[in-house]
DNA sequence: ACGCATCGAATGCAATTGCATTTAATACTG
DNA sequence: CAGTATTAAATGCAATTGCATTCGATGCGT
């Protein structure tokens, strides 16, 4: 026999899993199809776009995308390859880098943002 | 200027992302370290263990793990390789398969379950 | 100033994933 | 009943991920 609070925990976790999968998959599909970027790429661009000068330390990005340090590093590499960001030396601490939003990156973000919000509005509402 | 409801949506999504990442990462680490299985493997075993005869159609599993059909197929293949499940022909519809829990699989599930619940209790409580 | 622990980032590598396709079996339609 | 469409599952393949390691730069204690 399973205690009620345990059952509750499991149900909450399964709900979280289902909601996350639903929103994430919908976002991934629409952002990819309409703007050629994924969820993590969008979150990165958004973080940069709302920063002071469109730049931030590489470290800050791992928190935003909930990815390992190495995956975040490669994510930045892909964004740079696609011309959406640039890496810049950090003079104060030359171990680190600045990730800087390019004009193209800011443009892409502006285009994708309405799509992002629309998908959120559609998928976050009707499951609770 | 961003509308309040839009801001709310984004915050809810980021909260969902953060909560999911926190619980998922904690589960993945502990289940892997203590029982040598991942989150998806555990969910699969749990689905089978609570089935009537420890078996279910391959299809049902994709819903449980929120994975693509191909990824679910390979997940079953890994579990079979590790001796935790077996594939059985389905006589009624010979396109499909039954995934059947082995004794070893049921044992592994029983061992992992307390860990799973403990991590949920620890991680789902303190972020809200 | 020297030596050593620590830190930020990049990279080799194996594992997992999704998409597209394939294969086999079943269901439908005329 | 033949022929086609659909379904369940498996597989080739490229892309993404995390772990462990590496490399250079910083900080800290003596």
Image (cartoon, coloured by chain):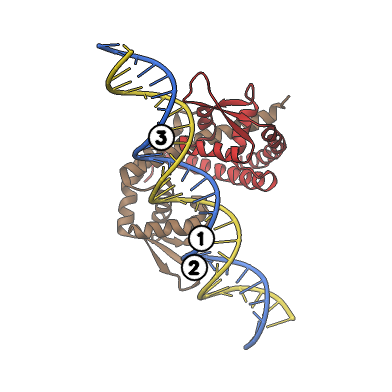
Chain colours: A red, B brown, C yellow, D blue
Per the image, the residue denoted by label 3 is: B121
- Per the rendering, the mark at residue B86 is none
Q: How many numbered discs? A: 3
Residue at disc 2, secondary structure: loop
2 vs 3, front mark: 2
Q: Is residue A115 above or below residue B68?
A: above
- Per the rendering, the mark at residue B96 is 2
Q: Answer whether residue A19 is visible to the viewer in this image.
A: yes
Whether marks 1 and 2 lie on the same chain: yes
Instruction: Provide the chain ID for the residue under circle 2.
Output: B
- In the rendered structure, which disc, 1 or 2, sits on the residue that comes first in sequence? 1
Q: B38 or A5, which lies in front?
A: B38
On the image, the x and y values in percent for residue C16 come to 45, 50
Instruction: Provide the chain ID for the residue under circle 3.
Output: B
Q: How far apart are the two marked residues, 2 and 3, measured between alpha carbons?
A: 37 Å
On the image, the x and y values in percent for residue B103 come to 30, 58
> Which part of the image, by quadrant, shows the N terminus of chain B?
top right
Left or right: D11 in relation to B115? right
Left or right: B95 in relation to B52? right
Q: B28 or A123, which lies in front?
A: B28
Classed neighbour count for the residue bearing mark 2: other residues with Cα under 10 Å, few (<14), some (14–19), many (≥20): some
Classed neighbour count for the residue bearing mark 1: other residues with Cα under 10 Å, few (<14), some (14–19), many (≥20): some
Q: Give the residue at x 32% y 49%.
A: B110
On the image, the x and y values in percent for residue B49 come to 38, 54
- In the rendered structure, which disc, 2 or 3, sits on the residue that comes first in sequence? 2
Per the image, the residue denoted by label 1 is: B59
Classed neighbour count for the residue bearing mark 3: other residues with Cα under 10 Å, few (<14), some (14–19), many (≥20): some
């Amino acid at each position: 026999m399973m205690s009620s609070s345990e059952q509750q925990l499991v149900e909450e976790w399964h709900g979280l899993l289902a909601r996350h999968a639903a929103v994430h998959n919908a976002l991934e599909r629409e952002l990819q199809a309409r703007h050629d970027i994924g969820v993590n790429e969008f979150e990165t661009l958004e973080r940069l776009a709302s920063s002071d000068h469109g730049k931030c330390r590489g470290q800050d990005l791992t928190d935003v995308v909930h990815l390992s340090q190495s995956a975040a590093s490669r994510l930045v590499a892909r964004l740079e390859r696609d011309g959406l960001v640039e890496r810049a030396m950090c003079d104060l601490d030359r171990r680190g880098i600045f990730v800087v939003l390019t004009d193209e990156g800011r443009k892409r973000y502006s285009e994708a943002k309405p799509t992002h919000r629309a998908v959120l509005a559609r998928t976050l509402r009707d499951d609770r």
